[in-house]
Image: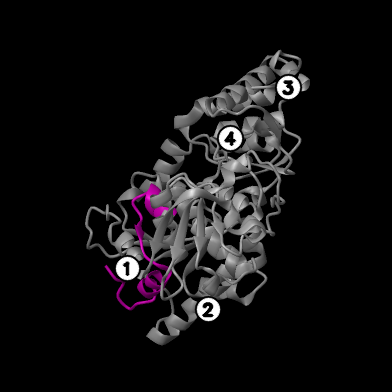
């Protein structure tokens, strides 16, 4: 790798041994992927995927201490993934003991480290840091050093920023150094599509299900998706962005997609069209039957597959303001139709604190609480990591949560039907 004189000086110890280790790590990372140079990080904000004080990863916190004690704090502001705990979310006494005494024993201490890093308030904890209410929204062409898979794929695809799928420590080191190895999705060639996906469904495909199908097919490659324009249009409005948020999270978790192009909609696809597609690209046709096939093959890992749902999570990734309003209207209509005052399954909607603050300004926030829905900033995945919570019959419309936990996937319409029935569906 060819370093600039300034980068070489850092590697040689010009700013101390710890910074030299940081740069050496980034060089080794770049060498592993054939990078020839470093690219400056140009975004205003950094983001860290590690937001939980889990006893099992104490070496990570020791590394944070070493970096912070050496004064290696990035000039960037920071956001972080959601917190793992919220007293509003239903949990038993035994589950709380496991959370606080066994799992997230280092949470307070780790949040102190994050404050030293540059996180200023609870507003900074969310996996959807790129939403307007949060403020960590990169610009087109910005080079990032992020790791959160759903945020990376959104920034690359919807915003036109440039970021590889990094690890939680590599992302921090890139932000501190101010540069990252230039390879993969940071290059023009690396952003070309190796797959053409032709969507031929008779109705708008569920975002999480379509993303899952594509992710499992193309894995880490870049898909160029055609046929969504009839449902999403050609402008990135709130509805389209919310759809792509959930779609992208599923491609990134059910596969390893870091970038997708939507024909006529996402920035690079609007500018370059099918010039983004590599010669010899493979073709994947998705119709109603293919989505049903994919969904039917999801494993049910509950101990009792016939159990009635005990808890429902909606919002992984965190919900947008428009999604909260849409869900309120749908729940209101379904409860009225079924003659019920509240949802029949304990239900948690998760969103960032800034989005929840905006939502509180609407009548829908009090409506949702009246309907028995809990509003929380929590990370559902971190909740489900509790071995006692894994035993619960948890349902979700998030394919990311389904992939990483024992939660069972249903489409949004199915979730709505289940939580507003007089008898919860099995």
| Residue occupied by mark 3 | 7
Drawn side of residue 373 relative to residue 338, left or right? right
Q: CA distance from mark 3 to mark 1?
A: 53 Å
In the rendered structure, which disc, 3 or 1, sits on the residue that comes first in sequence? Answer: 3
Under tag 2, what secondary structure? helix
Q: CA distance from mark 3 to mark 4?
A: 30 Å
Under tag 3, what secondary structure? helix
In the rendered structure, which disc, 3 or 4, sits on the residue that comes first in sequence? Answer: 3
In the rendered structure, which disc, 1 or 2, sits on the residue that comes first in sequence? Answer: 1
Q: CA distance from mark 4 to mark 2?
A: 39 Å
The answer to which image quadrant residue 108 occupies is top right
The answer to whether marks 1 and 2 mark residues whose Cβ atoms lie closer than 8 Å is no
For the residue pair 58 and 322, the one nearer the viewer reads as 322
Under tag 1, what secondary structure? helix
Q: Which residues are magenta?
A: 400-426
Q: CA distance from mark 1 to mark 2?
A: 30 Å
| Residue occupied by mark 4 | 110
Q: For marks 4 and 2, give the one nearer the viewer.
A: 2
Drawn side of residue 215 relative to residue 355, left or right? left
| Residue occupied by mark 2 | 329
């Amino acid at each position: 790798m060819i370093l600039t004189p300034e980068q070489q000086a850092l590697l040689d110890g010009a700013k101390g041994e710890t910074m030299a280790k940081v740069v050496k790590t980034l060089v080794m990372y770049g060498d592993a992927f054939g990078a020839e140079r470093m690219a400056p990080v140009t975004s205003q904000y950094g983001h860290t995927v590690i937001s939980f004080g889990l006893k099992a990863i104490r070496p990570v916190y020791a590394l944070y201490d070493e970096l912070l004690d050496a004064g290696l704090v990035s000039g960037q502001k920071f956001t972080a993934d959601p917190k793992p705990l919220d007293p509003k979310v239903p949990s038993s006494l035994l589950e709380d003991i496991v959370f606080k005494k066994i799992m997230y024993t280092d949470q307070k201490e780790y949040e102190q480290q994050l404050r030293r890093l540059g996180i200023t308030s609870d507003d900074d904890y969310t996996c959807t840091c790129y939403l307007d209410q949060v403020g960590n929204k990169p610009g087109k062409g910005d080079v990032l050093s992020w790791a959160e898979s759903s945020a990376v794929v959104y920034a690359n695809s919807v915003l036109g920023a440039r970021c590889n799928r990094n690890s939680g420590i590599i992302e921090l080191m890139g932000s501190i150094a101010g540069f990252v190895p230039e390879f993969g999705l940071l290059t023009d060639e690396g952003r070309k599509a190796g797959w053409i996906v032709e969507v031929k469904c008779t109705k708008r495909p569920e975002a999480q299900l379509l993303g899952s199908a594509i992710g499992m097919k193309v894995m880490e490659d870049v898909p160029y998706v055609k046929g969504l324009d009839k449902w999403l249009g050609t402008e990135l409005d709130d509805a389209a962005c919310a759809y792509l948020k959930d779609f992208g999270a599923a491609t990134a978790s059910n596969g390893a997609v870091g970038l997708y192009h939507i024909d006529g909609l996402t920035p690079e696809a609007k500018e370059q069209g099918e010039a983004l597609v590599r010669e010899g690209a493979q073709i994947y046709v998705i119709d109603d039957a293919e989505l049903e096939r994919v969904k039917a093959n999801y494993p049910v890992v509950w101990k009792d597959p016939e159990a009635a749902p005990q808890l429902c999570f909606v919002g992984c990734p965190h919900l947008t303001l428009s999604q909260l309003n849409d869900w309120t209207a749908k729940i209101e209509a379904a409860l009225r139709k079924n003659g019920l005052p509240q949802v029949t399954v304990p239900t948690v909607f998760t969103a960032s604190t800034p989005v929840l603050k905006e939502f509180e300004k609407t009548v829908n926030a009090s409506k949702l609480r009246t309907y028995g829905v809990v509003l929380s900033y929590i990370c559902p995945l971190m909740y489900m990591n509790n071995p006692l919570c894994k035993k619960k019959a948890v349902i979700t419309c998030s394919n990311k949560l389904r992939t990483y936990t024992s939660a069972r996937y249903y489409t949004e319409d199915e979730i709505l039907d289940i939580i507003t029935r007089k008898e919860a569906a099995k």
